[in-house]
Each structure stands twice: as C-alpha cells, then as structure tokens.
Image (cartoon, rainbow, N blue to C red):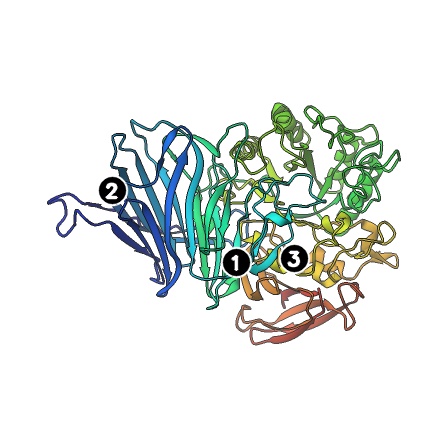
Amino acid sequence: MKIATLQITFLLCVALAITGCRETQTDYSVSSPDGHIVVDLALSNSGQPYYRVNYKDQTVIDTSFMSFDFKDLPSLKDNFKIVNTATGTFDESWDMPWGEQLSVRNNYNELIVNLEEQSEAKRRLSIHFKVYDDGLGFRYEFPEQPNLNEVLITDENTQFNLNGDHKVWWIPGDWDIYEHVYNETKFSEIDAITKQNHPNLSATYIPENAVNTPVTMKTDEGLYLSFHEADLTNYSGMTLKVDHSNLDMVSELVGSERLGAKAKLTVPFNTPWRTIQIAERAGDLIESKLALNLNDPNEIGAVDYFTPMKYVGIWWEMHIGKSTWDMEGSQDMSTWMEGKEGGTRHGATTENAKKYIDFASAYGIRGLLVEGWNTGWDKWISNDREGVFDFMTPYADYDFDDVRDYAKSKNVEIIMHHETSAAPLTYEKQMDQAYDFMKSNGINSVKTGYVGKIIPRGEYHHGQWMVNHYHKVLVETAKKKIAVNAHEPIKATGKRRTYPNAIAREGLRGQEFNAWATDGGNPPSHLPTVAFTRMLSGPIDFTPGVFNIKFNEYKESNQVNTTLAHQLALYVVIYSPIQMACDLPEHYMLDGKIHPAFQFISDVGVDWQQTKVLDGEVGDFVVIARQERNTGDWFVGGITDENEREQSVSFNFLEEGKTYDATLYRDGADAHWDNNPQDYDIEKMELTKASDVTINMAPGGGFAISIVERK
C-alpha cells in the first residue's frame, strides 16, 4: 500500500508576500523526519552557496562550498542571491520487484533553494536537498533560462568538509576501473597516486589523489559515514579529490580528452544526487536504501521475464588455466594479456556445456553462463578491437542450437555473454540484432563485459560518454525484455529502481583475482570491507562458491584466501539476485558424490523478503540474515578477516512461538584460510526466537545457516 503526503510551501522573500519573511534572509535549514540530521544552506559574504550537516548536534560536514567551472563561460560561483525557497515532506512505501527486501519506505523532508546570479546574465541555479533518517542527498538543478543554453563543465566543485581525521576505507579514484584492493587508513594518509602500478588491470587511470565512491569512514566518536552518488544519468561519474591539509574532499568528475571537459549538457538539466549516509551502527549502512529512494520509480513495468537465480558456467576454468576462451588457445588467463601458443583447450564446446547443464539440472541450479562461445576471442585484447566480436556467430565446436535445446530439456536457462572488449560502438551497431537473436532463442538475460581501454580513444569507463552507453544498453534491453548483468561497469547508483532490468554488476575486485593476480589475490579482509563499501551501491556479481580453494593442479602459486565455509556465507553476505556456483562441477564432488556442503548452495535463496544485519565492523567481519520470499525460510551468513573470531548469533528475528530446524555449515576445528581452508563441519540444530548460538570463525573463515520452520 502506498501512502504519500507532499506539502510544498513557497517562501517568497518579497515585501508583503508572507508575514515574517525577511528580504535579507540568506540561510535555511531542513531536518530529517526524526530530527536527528539537520542541513543548513547559506550564502557567504560574497554570495557563494555553502552547506553544513549536523547529526544530533554533532558536526558531520562543516562549512562546504559549491560552485561550477565551465569551458568558455565564467564560473558559476558567487554573487548569488536567494530568490525563493520551497520546503516539503514526502512519505511513501514502494515494492521492489526483486531485491534485498520486499517493501521500501521513502520518507524525507526537502528543501529547494532557488538562486540567481547578480550579473547581467542573471544565471539561475537551484540546490535541492532531501534529508532522510539515514542520510541525505542533494543535487544541482539548472532550470530553463534565456542566458544559459549549453554548458561544458570543466569542474563541479562540491566540497565535503570533514570534522576530523577519520578512518577511511577507500580505493583510488580510477577513471577506468574499480578493481582495486581496499585500503584502510586515516584520511590524512590517503595516497592514490603512488598506487598506480597495477599489473593485473587491463585499464587504469588515476590522475588525482582522489578516491572512488562509495567511500566509507568512521569518526573518532564512532559515527559511520559513506559518500556516494545516486541517479547517475547523462553526467560524468564522480570521484572525490582529497585535501589532507584541510581534511576535506571536493568532487572530481571523470573527464573526456575528446570533449576537453568533464560533461556536456543542455539546459535544463539536473546533476546526480550527492549522497551522505550517516549511521551509529555499521550494519545500518547496509540496510539503508537511500540511493534507491533518490532514483525515479520504475519506468519499464514488470520484469517477470527475469527470475532471480543461481547459475553455473564455463568461466572459472578459463581463469585457473584449464581452458581458454578462443579455439586457438592463444588467450590464457595464466599469463593474462600475453597468452600462450596454440592448444586445443577451448572451454565453450558443446560437450562441455552439456556437462554443466547436467550438473545444474541435478542439483537445483537454474542457469548456465557460457563464455567464449562466439567468434572474436582470438583478437579481443588486440590494439585494433573495433569489429572484433560477432554476438551471434558461434565457434565451430559449439553447436548453439544443440546446447539451447538440451538446456531447455533439462529446465536450465541459458545466460547470454556479450564481451565488447571495450569497443562499445561495435556493440551498439549489433545491439538490436543481438538482442533479437537472444529473444528468438528464449534467452532473457545477458552478462556484458568491457575489458580494456575504451574505444574511442580519449574516453574512460566512468565518463559521461560511457555513462550514456551503459544507459542505452538498459533502455534497449528493456524494450526487448532482457535483464543485464554488467561487468567492467559504471558504478551502481540506484538506477535499478527505475530500470529493474539492471539486475547486477561487477564493479569491484572480484573472485577471478584469486586465480590470476600476481599480488596474492584478494586478502581475507576484502569482502568484510566490500560489504560496507561497494555493496552499499547495489548488487554484486562476485561469483562465489569455490570449493577447490588451492586448485594446485592448475596453478600452484594462486589460491582463494578464504575457507570453504566463508565461500558458503557469501551467498547471504554479498547480495545479488543472481549468484554463481563458480567452481568446476568436478570440484563439487567428493568420493563420487555431491559434496555435503553443496547442499547449502542448492538451498540458499537469492530473492529476499527482508534483510537484517546482525553484527559487523567495517573491514573486520559481518553477519547478515535474510528471509527468502515465497518460502519464508531464513539464511544467515557470517565472514571474518584474517583474524579468528568467536561470534554470538541471536535469532530474535524468528517468529514467536515457532520452532525451526537449522543446518549450520561452519569452519572445522583446524580450519585456516591458508593452512587448512577445506576443513568444515555440518551441524543440525533446533532454533526458536529465544535461541543464541556462539560460532567460531577461523582466520579467513565464516559460517552459513539455513533455517526452515518445523511443520
């Protein structure tokens, strides 16, 4: 049921307009519905707008200025006056077609401040705040006006003036890729520039000492902050440039060498929302739906063509070096960019695809992803990548029709794969035909990829040009009723509310780094950090489920730096409506039978009625409980960093007066992410709402629990 109240009051500061309104008023405030967050907007003596944010009388953001620089136009900075303001309140509930929960409350107070430059041009700008109980968003709105038509933005100068030298979990403000290990430092110790040697990244560009968003902080007083953006549309992605001496950040938009600016826009337009989450408990950052609420409602209607699912795929075997993407065997992730000579280890064969289909069908897995099925992989990392890929023509050893029919007979859904090799113009030329090909073959979802430096040259993955390309993919797939899982994507900013066919994306240092990175792969602390940083922006296709942790038969120098129980827990901890069981089918077998721990992967849900973060600390550990839609079953996952941890779990989220049967998958007594990662125990137990269980997590370990109401 939707309940909405909208009250707008215009405070026109002109003589006799409203009793008590002062013509000289230059400062206004708006608070959250619970009154804990207060935002002030004011003008300096020179007429420059600035804002401040307080939480329970504690300064969160001190005086922070706002301005724009343009190409061939004067800066829009000061000499403003406040023409009028509008305030209002809004309260509704809306349902997610799929997601971490069913119902989302969207409740905020807002303030719109309309400014006019005191110059001959009289340029106008509005600053729009929405303040929620869990944070705030603000954006710039450029109304239609006679003296401002088209602008080339060279800099958006939005300041975030911190009130202390906070602890920060950050990755560099890379214009091309988010696939970095998170750093944990004081704000004054952030140094993105000296971290530019990234041998495992195919594209990277870090021009400033800046961080990418979401960036999460913890104050000395124990308050958690996370900075991001919402509704990134027809604009450039925002990084945050760091100023150590003043303890502040300023927005640094991703640029375009072809444009000679950061963004090109036609008035009227709105920028994305700049967001600040505020929480007293780390887990509240995860439970917040601030970014989603700052996006427009669903524009594309029902997405019943997409069903949240688990899937297997011809993918991990290429990363560990068992097989290759192309028939010639020249592209081998064992050596990443250079490859090896010859070979007949092509992964995407008809026979191999059927093996995965048989496994999926036998053990309750709904989907199959096949990478390397289509021609072009022998040239996909060459310098001349335009026109390389054909998104409809299979290799000779992959009978597309036979695989399609076999999958259908086994009730397994094929997921299409479109690797563009960062040549989006080639993709756009084939897009319509490729999507029609998918639909004619009963395929309703696609994993897209953009590995490499963007063509045309001078554009970056996270600049305006590519933001618009990613948006075009969403629009065109929505027309065809296709869901998109984007890899090497633009950051998630809540657009899945408006376009719920945007089901997941990569946008982080994923599982594959454990297979081929030369720096030791992802550390045990990686995912306990990701849960409170990258995951705040949206669903992650992380591809969990590695059981053969060491995979020494393929690569003795690489491994996954977690225990097996940690891998199980990821199905609950790291949210996505699609979850891969990424390992090879043979690695899920033990003594000729299915591995006992695989039962959790078969059972665990992917679409949730509600989510509760039970405990956690950024970078250290996290414990999350989720209730599955339709069945009402609960699943709990907990993971830790390199430190052993004794974790108490309270089950007070269960229903009063009912008894539940639970299966606990935990680290064995001798488990350790490096020394003994596959040591595990499985324990049956009875639970009620009053139950409390203490579980030991090994170094780099975790636990997973399935909970079913006793009938």
Q: CA distance from mark 1 to mark 3?
A: 22 Å
Q: Which residue is mark 3?
A: 526
Which label number is shown at residue 309? Answer: none
- Total marks shown come to 3
Q: Is residue 404 above or below residue 111?
A: above
Left or right position of 490 against 398: left
Amino acid under disc 1: Ser
Q: Which mark is residue 188?
A: 1
Q: Nearer the viewer, mark 3 or mark 2?
A: 2
Q: Is residue 586 visible?
A: yes
Q: Position of residue 285 (x, y in %)?
A: 50, 59
Sequence-wise, the earlier of marks 2 and 1 is 2
Chain-order first, disc 1 or disc 3: 1
Whole-percent x, y for residue 708 in the image: 63, 65
Circle nearer the N terminus (3, 2): 2
Tell whether label 1 touches label 2 (CB within 8 Å). Answer: no
Find residue 26 and report its horizontal and vertical position in percent: 24, 49
In what quadrant of the picture does the C terminus appear?
Answer: bottom right
Which residue is at the front of the view, 336 or 351? 336
Q: Residues within 10 Å of mark 3 (few under 14, many from 20)?
A: many
Which amino acid, mark 2? Lys
Q: Position of residue 448 (x, y in %)?
A: 65, 36
Identify the residue at horizontal 66%, vertical 37% (top origin): 449
* Relative depth, front residue between 615 and 258: 258
Label 1 SS: helix
Position above or below: 584 against 431: below
SS of the residue at dot 3?
A: helix
Q: CA distance from mark 3 to mark 2?
A: 47 Å
The residue that label 2 is drawn on is 81
Distance from the alpha carbon under mark 2 to that under mark 1: 35 Å
1 or 3: mark nearer the eye: 1
